[in-house]
């Protein structure tokens, strides 16, 4: 289970890499998104969210949410978060974004525990790396070499195989460094045990 300190780090890094917009925008794949990388798969899903009007700060109607979803959906993708702001008239409050992010953490932590039965016993760095990858990819099922390395606790091999396509190089480096740090810490621990 993630500690509170780990959750704080997760939230910070997700906002850094995903961005954080209270309005609807398109991600790099053209999906309508809000908050910290929260995918809105349909108008109906958008209408379940607690949007407010920018003017007057009133609760948005289903019609307003539907119209805004349609407007954003038709825009060009990958334009950066700020590009979409001028086309939107609705927003989520910070507390709603925090709830969405916390729900993602719970959902993906469960998926990680199912995929890696020893997840709770992995070093913090490994758990943070796995979370970043599953949040970005949605699933790690197709990453066979990486998964084998993780299950074998070969953090160096996992670091060598964690590079994702179509994301910031800084994000890939962040995950790689987490795994390499876990590998280094593991070697130090092993060596200190041998010298006693």
Image (cartoon, rainbow, N blue to C red):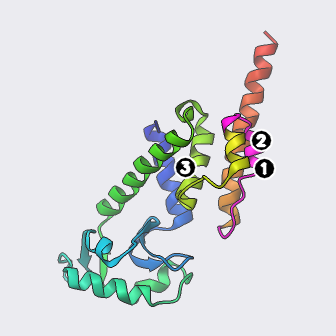
Number of callouts in the render?
A: 3
Q: CA distance from mark 2 to mark 3?
A: 17 Å
The location of residue 100, given as percent across then percent down, is 36, 59
Q: Quadrant of residue 42?
A: bottom left
Residue in the picture at 66% in, 67% down? 168
Which range is magenta? 151-167
Q: Which residue has dot 1 on it? A: 160
Q: Could you tell which of marks 1 and 3 lies nearer the N-terminus?
A: 3
Most foreground residue, 80 or 159: 159
Mark drawn on residue 156: 2
Secondary-structure class at tag 2: helix
Contact between marks 1 and 2 (CB within 8 A): the answer is yes
Most foreground residue, 104 or 92: 104
Q: Which residue has dot 3 on it? A: 131
Q: CA distance from mark 1 to mark 2?
A: 6 Å
The location of residue 161, given as percent across then percent down, is 75, 52
**Quarter of the image where the C terminus is located:** top right
Q: Determine if the magenta segment contains residue 162.
A: yes
Question: Above or below — where is 146 with respect to 15?
Answer: above
């Amino acid at each position: 289970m993630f500690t509170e300190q780990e959750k704080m780090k997760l939230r910070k890094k997700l906002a850094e890499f995903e961005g954080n917009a209270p309005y609807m925008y398109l991600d790099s794949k053209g999906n309508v998104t809000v908050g910290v990388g929260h995918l809105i798969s349909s108008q109906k899903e958008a209408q379940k969210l607690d949007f407010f009007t920018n003017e007057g700060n009133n609760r948005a109607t289903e019609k307003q949410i539907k119209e805004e979803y349609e407007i954003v959906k038709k825009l060009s993708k990958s334009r950066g978060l700020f590009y979409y702001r001028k086309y939107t008239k609705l927003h989520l409050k910070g507390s709603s974004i925090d709830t969405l992010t916390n729900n993602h953490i719970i959902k993906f932590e469960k998926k990680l525990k199912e995929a890696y039965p020893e997840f709770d016993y992995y070093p913090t760095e490994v758990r943070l790396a796995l979370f970043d990858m599953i949040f970005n990819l949605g699933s790690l099922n197709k990453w066979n070499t990486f998964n084998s390395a993780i299950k074998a606790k070969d953090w160096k091999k996992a670091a060598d195989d964690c590079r994702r396509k179509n994301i910031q190089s800084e994000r890939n480096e962040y995950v790689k460094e987490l795994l390499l740090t876990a590998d280094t810490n593991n070697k130090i621990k092993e060596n200190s045990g041998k010298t006693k």
